[in-house]
Amino acid sequence: MNAAKSPWWHTATIYQIYPRSFSDSNGDGIGDIPGIINRLDYLADLGINAIWLSPIYKSPMDDNGYDISDYQEVAAEYGTLEDFDYLVAEANTRGIGIILDLVVNHSSDEHPWFIDACGSRDSKYRDFYTWRDPAPGGGVPNDIPSVFGGAAWSFHEPTGQYYFHQFTRRQPDLNWQNPELRESIYRMMNWWLDRGIAGFRMDVIDLIGKEPDRGITAEGPHLHTYLQEMHARTYGGRDILTVGETWSATPNSALLYSGRNRNELSMIFQFEHVTQAWHPIHGKWQPMDFDLVALKEVLGKWQLALAEDGWNSLFWGNHDLPRAVSKYGDVSGYHKQSAKMLATVLHLLKGTPYVYQGEEIGMTNVSFTSIEQFKDVETLNMHRLHLEAGLSANEFIAGANVNGRDNARTPMQWTQAEHGGFTTGSPWIEVNPNYRHINVEASLSDSQSILAHYRHLIGLRNQHPVIVYGRYQSFLDQDPQFFVYTRTLNDQMLLVVANFSNKPGMLELPDELQLQGECISYNYDPVDHIGPQTELQPYEAFAVLCRGNK
Ligand code: GLC
Ligand code: CA
C-alpha cells in the first residue's frame, strides 16, 4: 500500500473526552467547552491528532447527553455554539480535529419530534418513532428487552400505543425506515460538517436497521443501505473520520462497515475483547477475571481479519467501560509498569488507537461504598432490578465498582488540589481520592511517567510506517503470561513482547525471533538483544525494531 496516499486517520491517535468530567471552567462542578479549550495545549503536547467529544448537545441528561433534545444546539451547561466554533478553531490551529458523537439511533423524549409525536396518532412526526398497539391480550407488543433493563416498549397512555426504546424510556428509538427522518438527520450532519469538524463517532449505529416486529435489533437488513445513503448524502466527498460503535460486529460484518470500497465508515469499535471477560449469564455485573489466552485470540483474530481490507480501531477503555489499568493491570503493586505495558501492546497493533481521558496518567476505577455515590442511569436501573432479583446491595456495589460505567466518569485528575483541580466548586460526581498522587501535574514533572510513555508511543506511530502498516503475526498463542507479536513491513520487523503478570517470567522465543535491533519502547531497561531465554520483570513490555538484518 502506498502510505503517501492513505487517509490521515491511518496514522492518527484519537483522544476521547467525556465533557462532563474533563475540565470545569466556571466552578459549577460540570466540565464544559471552555474548560476543554484551556487544556488544548496539554493535548497537543501529548501528540494526539483528533478529539472524540462525547455528546455536547442540548439534552435533559438522563444518560449524560446520549439523549438529545436538540441536535443543533449546545447544552447550556457545556457552553454555546460560539464556544464550540472557538474550540474547533483553537484545536485546528494545534493540528487537532474535533470528532462529534452522532447519537441518532434514538433521541430524547424531550426532542420536539417526540413531543409532537406524542400529541396524536396523526402527528406529522409520529412515524419518526416506532409505535405499536398492545399485544392482542394486552401488554407489550413483544419481549425485546431494553439494554438498560426492563422492556424495550413503554406505554403511552394518551394515544394508547407502545413506543420502542432500546435504552431508557427517555431515549425513544428513531425510525430509520422513514425517509424524512433520514433526510433530517443528513441535513443536521451537513450543518456540523460545514462548521469544520473532523468526523463522527456513531453511537450504537449497528442498531439503526432494527426491525422490532421481527425481533431484529442489531445489524438489521437495511443497515448497510442506510450507511451507504448517509455516506453519499453527507461526508462522502469529505476527508473525515467515521467510527461506528457496533457491539454486535463480527470480523465479517466489519468488512462491510469499513471495507475500502463499501462507502460506509472508516472503521468500527468492536467489543469482543471486552465481552469475552463478561459472565455468560450475568454479563458485566458479575465480574470475572480476563483470560489472556482468550484476549490474545480475539485481538489477533481482528488483526488478521482486517489485514487487507477494512481498518481496526484500538482501545482498552471508553466512557462505558472500567479503567483499563484496573481491568487488565495491577493498580496496587505495579500501577506504572502495568499501565505502560498495556499502552505498549495496544499502540503497536495495526489500527487507529483511542486514548480515553485519564488513561494516559493511569487513572483507576473508584471504590464507592453507597449507591448514592453512583450517577449512571444504567447502574442505577440495574441496581433496582438486581436487588429485586435477590442480589444484596453490597454484592451489586462490588460489581459496579469493577465494571460500572461511573469508573470512567469520575473527574479528570489535573493536580493535587482539592477535587483534583477539576473544579473550584463541587463536582457532579466524586473525584477518585487517589488524585493526590495520580494527576497530570505530577505526571508532567516525572520523565518516567505513564504520560511520558504515552507521548512516546504516539510519537513512534508517526515515525515508523511499520507500526501503521506492518503485517501482524502472533507467537506463543497458548502462553498464559506473555503476549508476543511481530509487525513486518518490507525489510523491517518490529517485535513486541509483554508480560501480563505480576510475576517475573522466563521467555523462550523461537529461533526466528532471537534477534538484535533497536529497542524503541520499554518500561524497565531497554532490551536490544533477544537470546534463547529472556527474563521478564513483572508487567515488563518492550519493542525491538530490526531493519534488514534478519
Ligand atoms: C452507547 C454509548 C452509551 C450510551 C448508549 C445509548 O453505548 O456509548 O454511553 O448510554 O449508547 O446512547
Ligand atoms: Ca462548568
Image (tube, rainbow, N blue to C red):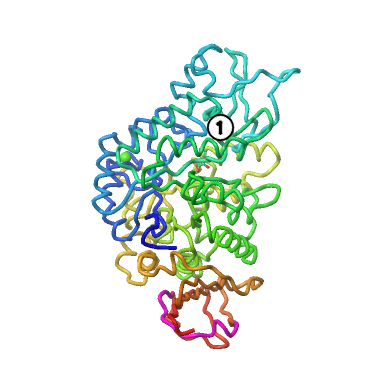
Badge 1 marks a residue whose secondary structure is loop
Q: Is mark 1 within 8 Å of ligand 1?
A: no
* Residue 323 screen position, x and y as percent: 49, 56
Q: Is residue 451 magenta?
A: no
Q: Quadrant of residue 238?
A: top left
Residue kind at label 1, given as amino acid type: Thr
Q: With respect to residue 254, does 46 lie above or below?
A: below
Residue at 62% from the left image edge and 46% from the top image edge? 396
Q: Is residue 61 above or below residue 501?
A: above
Give, as a single range, the part of the protein colored magenta: 510-522
Q: Residue at x 44, y 77 (%)?
A: 545
Q: Which residue extends farthest right?
A: 137
Task: Tell whether 327 sits left or right of 426.
Answer: right
Location of residue 503 in the rendering, given as x and y in whole percent from the top left corner: 57, 76
Where's the N terminus, which quadrant? bottom left
Is residue 505 rendered to the left or right of residue 17?
A: right
The residue pinned by badge 1 equals 168
User: 353 and 374: which one is in front?
Assistant: 353
Task: Where is residue 476? Give x, y as percent.
Answer: 62, 74
Q: Picture coordinates of residue 363 (x, y %)? A: 44, 58
Q: Is residue 264 left or right of residue 295?
A: left
Depth check: give the residue in front, 109 or 491.
491
